[in-house]
Amino acid sequence: MFKYHCLNPISAVGMNKLDENYVKTENADEADVILVRSAKMHEMEFGKNLKAIARAGAGVNNIPLDKCAEEGIVVFNTPGANANGVKELVIAGMLLAARDVVGGIQWVQEFEEDGDIAKLAEKKKKAFAGTELSGKKLGVIGLGAIGVLVANVATHLGMEVYGYDPYVSVDSAWRLSRSIHHATTVDEIYKECDYITIHVPALDSTKGMIDKNAISLMKEGVVILNFARDVLVNQEDIVDALVAGKVHRYVTDFPTKEIVGVKGAIVIPHLGASTEESEDNCAQMAVAEIRDFLENGNITHSVNYPDCNVGTKADGDRITILHRNVPNMIGQFTTLLAQENQNIALMTNKSKKEYAYTVIDVDGSVSDEVVSKLESITDVLGVRVIK
Ligand SMILES: NC(=O)C1=CN([C@@H]2O[C@H](COP(=O)(O)OP(=O)(O)OC[C@H]3O[C@@H](n4cnc5c(N)ncnc54)[C@H](O)[C@@H]3O)[C@@H](O)[C@H]2O)C=CC1
Ligand SMILES: O=C(O)CCC(=O)C(=O)O
């Protein structure tokens, strides 16, 4: 029996895939697993039963990944599951920026009761006119799940698309349209493009990347779109650039006290992933990841531990060990199991940066005493036996 706690509402389409072995708890301290969307977890203390956190979404900057790894908590996300939802809103954002659609709609609403609105609109409409996307240059920074979709669809709108991602995955590279111009420096995007959209994670290396220096390289009247995270754009600098007219519009999915109400800012209340389809996809993927981890020890799409798939458990017990990625860990595990007269049927070890994961299937059954001995090995961070 596993207890789960939800910090945000998670789609029933996914939650319904938890069977009778899973019960909901309102008390996070007693949960085996926590499901979360955007709730901030940095200040949370984690209960001793907590084995996994599943982020139904892509960005994990709301979760203390290293702290979790040190406490033997595996953090999962759902890569790509909401990418189409975000892509569609980014395209909407570009269209909202191209003409003053928002200003026009607001103006029309003021004349709700006016019988002459059709005539007035024809006179007033030039105030909201703009340009077309076709023929403009779009720069996409970050060619992951979302960036690739945005880049590809923009080519069908007649845009000339530049892409920049020094760490692009092979999978993303395969999915990217051949017509996308490969920018080898981010400055090339800044200098060349009429529209610039960012799709990178919030990391120490990306925070504040759009600042006054970056903006100074951009074209007069550039449109910047940020559907990734507020912290990627220096809020003071973007406000200054909007006021000065250097940036024509800043379309963002992240309201901040600095940007709300600034002329030229189109601010959306974090709706990128708020579609039925994205919410269902994320929830289903998160639940599948959790179940495979809790029931079989397999790790898929973890952001703080290595992925590891050893299939379903056989008749004997399966021992899963989360540990630091340092020498002589496997030697200690196998020596201990040999001393306990346990025959190893299967063993796998995977590592990711500072952390590693070892799965050992034994022919027999593992005692609590063996678990305690494994737990007491230096650099072991979590031990679980799946019966
Ligand atoms: N508005 C919303 O509701 C949503 C926002 N997001 C945000 O969008 C971000 C991206 O999402 P996905 O595309 O799904 O993630 P992803 O992990 O598939 O792609 C991120 C890409 O950024 C690249 N990258 C990393 N550092 C870079 C740098 N300095 N310069 C250029 N490229 C760099 C990576 O190589 C990777 O290809 C997430 O981390 C999240 O913060 C994601 C989903 C929904
Ligand atoms: O769950 C949400 O609505 C937020 C989605 C998001 O920002 C992400 O997946 O990174």
Image (cartoon, rainbow, N blue to C red):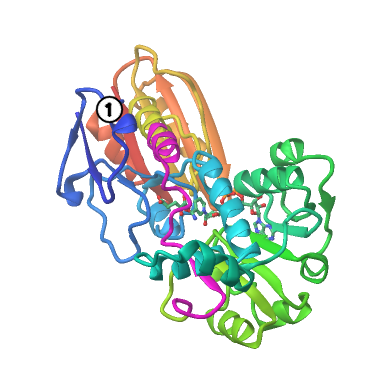
Is 272 magenta? The answer is: yes
Residue 312 part of the magenta-drawn span: no
Which quadrant of the figure contains the C terminus?
A: top left
Total marks placed = 1
Q: Quadrant of residue 193?
A: bottom right
The one nearer the camera, 256 or 387, is 256
Q: Which residues lie in the magenta part?
A: 259-284
Q: Secondary structure at mark 1?
A: loop
Query: Which quadrant is home to the N terminus?
Result: top left
Seen from the viewer's position, the closer of residues 343 and 78 is 78
Whether 315 is drawn above or below 348: the answer is above
Residue 228 point in image, percent of width and height: 54, 59
Neighbourhood count class around disc 1 (C-alpha, 10 Å): few under 14, some 14–19, many 20 upward: few
Query: Disc 1 marks which amino acid?
Result: Asn
Q: In this rendering, does residue 254 appear at all?
A: no
For the view shown, which residue lies furthest in the left direction?
Answer: 26
Residue beneath the point at 44% across and 56% down: 65
Residue 152 spot, x, y in % from top left: 72, 43
* Position in image of residue 238 (x %, y %): 59, 79
Outermost residue toward the top in this view: 315
**In the image, what residue occupies the spot 61% across and 51% down?**
91
Image-quadrant location for residue 136:
bottom right
* Residue at 69% across, 43% down: 153
The answer to whether one can see residue 62 in this image is yes
The residue that appears at 40% across and 60% down in the rendered structure is: 62
Residue to which mark 1 is pinned:
16
As displayed, is residue 84 above or below residue 66?
above
